[in-house]
Amino acid sequence: MLTQSISELKGIGEKLESQLNELGLFTIEDLLFYFPFRYDSYEVKPLTELTHNEKATIEGEVVSEPSLSFFGRKKSRLTFTLQVEQFAVKAVMFNRAFAKKQLHAGDTVTVTGKWDQQRLQITVSQFKKGESKSQAPIQPVYTLKEGVPLTTLRKYIKASIDAYEHEIPEILPEELQRAYKLPERPQAIRQMHYPDNRIMLKHAKRRFIYEEFLIFQLKMQLLRKHHRESTTGNAQSYDNGKLTSFVQALPFELTQAQKRSLAEILKDMKNPHRMNRLLQGDVGSGKTAVAAIALYASITAGKQGALMVPTEILAEQHFQSLMEMFEGRATVALLTGSIKGKKRREILESVRAGDIDILIGTHALIQDEVEFHDLGFVIVDEQHRFGVRQRRTLRDKGLYPDVLFMTATPIPRTLAITAFGDMDVSVIDEMPAGRKPVETYWVKGEMTDRVLSFIQKEIDQGHQAYVICPLIEESDQLDIQNAVELYNQLSSVYEPNIPVGLMHGRLHNEEKEEVMQEFAENRLKVLVSTTVVEVGVNVPNATVMVIYDAERFGLSQLHQLRGRVGRGSDQSYCILLADPKGDVGKERMRIMTETTDGFELSEQDLKLRGPGDFFGRKQSGMPEFKVADMVHDYRALETARRDAAEIITEERLDKDSRYRPLRDLIYQDKQIMGEVLD
């Protein structure tokens, strides 16, 4: 039984068991699936194939007696020359004085260490007399805790494979194994730990990459199917004629990308199942226009609509723009925390009676006191991933509206199909005509005075500027300290003629709203802020975005910040003040100055930073894979997603006995099944 305790293995006592438990190893199965994080290779390669400064193993004959010298207490250096092929290679060993007695001219020796191509020298970390044949060419290296030596862990993993290999169940049906030429699970596990050679290891990894992605995608597709089928009779019969005249009355032409996304949303609305769709598009790509048309479609079908946004000021901006767009075609109301007393009661009563068509507000919209007459369409803008809890809140109210989630973070396709695998995804990847791209410049710290003069020049022309202060990781306190210092500096430069404002995360919501309102109304000319300014506020008059210590930010965050400017008809600028030390930081600055395409940037960001950092570690919700890597293995992810969709559509998990092991494994996931069976 793979569920047996590791203490069943001979030689594991209480102390070792407790140490292994700290590594998360409790059962035989845990040991079997505790894969190495890297492999030490002892493959002997010709010198011409070795890479400079990398670990290498070479085999040769000791040419002369080793020379030993001492420096400092207990520190020594042993050097000898090896004849390897037709070359003389210098071998250096530190603090191994004992080896002088073991190595003699004429001995064959195998050494492993750091290879220096230029000097034809190897700094030896391991050596062994004799030829390399008796040593396994590829050795597993595991993550360890203090007190558990690598040799001990290797020993017990090998013991568990030898004793329990025959009990490892195969979970992939034969047709999938055959289609992708995947090794069987027991064989793949042995090769993951003790590979015969690099090719066998590669196939074993391929097997587990596909398996991990398939299991994850099956869970996502099950959720997606459940969300779609949790309601029927949800079709919205909107009035096509009214919708067409509304679109034609808009003061701008929709882009092809907007038309495509709108068609996908309208198709979902006609469908009897509930919509669960993500609309992603770069800052300024026109998501709000698409959302407004979809809301209007729902109104013509006799339903109410709701638009939920993260901040009050954003709610007010959406309220103003929708009032202008609808011009008497629909009743629009605003509900935020600051609307109180009689006015609040009147709004709530009108919503309940069905007199209000569209309600715009913050998270308050799904609170108990808000009762809709007939809610048909909900749009959630930025930051509120409309999760299980909110869906349940609506469901408990007896509401099953179509849900559209909007984000201005251009999420790379590989992440979108993973993080939002239970959603359908629409993408607006085209900018409206006439938008001027924001000009982006990277300047070094010594040019700060010129940057401040440039801000002054733009303000003299009637414009405004954002100044984002340095980001110090994991330190809210220091972020604020930085913001306050920068605010004081700029105030001394610009005031009293140019009013400067300050915004940071420790301000109360009302204070933040007040500062943003003053900036939006042009009463403040320069806004010093931490990254709290990132989401959504529209100030068309702001034409300059200066970001201090820009190398500390990821590309996606820099792009989001840059998106705060360039919202009017005037040319806008983003200035990155940065002195990056490493290549990654320099590369980031270069990419930012060369492209304003958010999707291209997000793909680059993913390559530079990895998926964990993309959404921010704390709220990423990204799955932890043992072997698979979403960026590197994106083709396997696409394949697994396609296969999972077919398996769920054709109901193979329930109807085909060959898929029973997969079904049993997936149904063990309590979180997924709790949602599906709820």
Image (cartoon, helix red, strand yellow):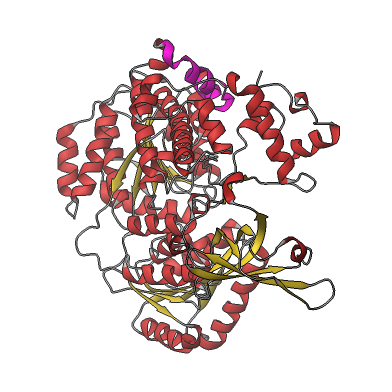
**Left or right position of 198 against 423:** right
Magenta portion: prevailing SS class: helix
Which segment is the magenta one? 657-676
Residue located 46% across and 85% down the image = 452
**Up/down of 54 relative to 11, above or below:** below
Numbered label tally:
0
Q: Nearer the viewer, residue 18 or 241?
A: 18
Q: Split into 4 quadrants, where in the image is the N terminus?
A: top right
**Up/down of 49 relative to 319, above or below:** below
Give the quarter of the image for residue 160.
top right
Q: Position of residue 552 (x, y in %)?
A: 53, 68
Residue located 37% across and 30% down the image = 181
Residue 518: tell me if it is visible. yes
Q: Position of residue 351 (x, y in %)?
A: 42, 34
**Up/down of 473 relative to 399, above or below:** below
Residue 276: tell me if it is visible. no
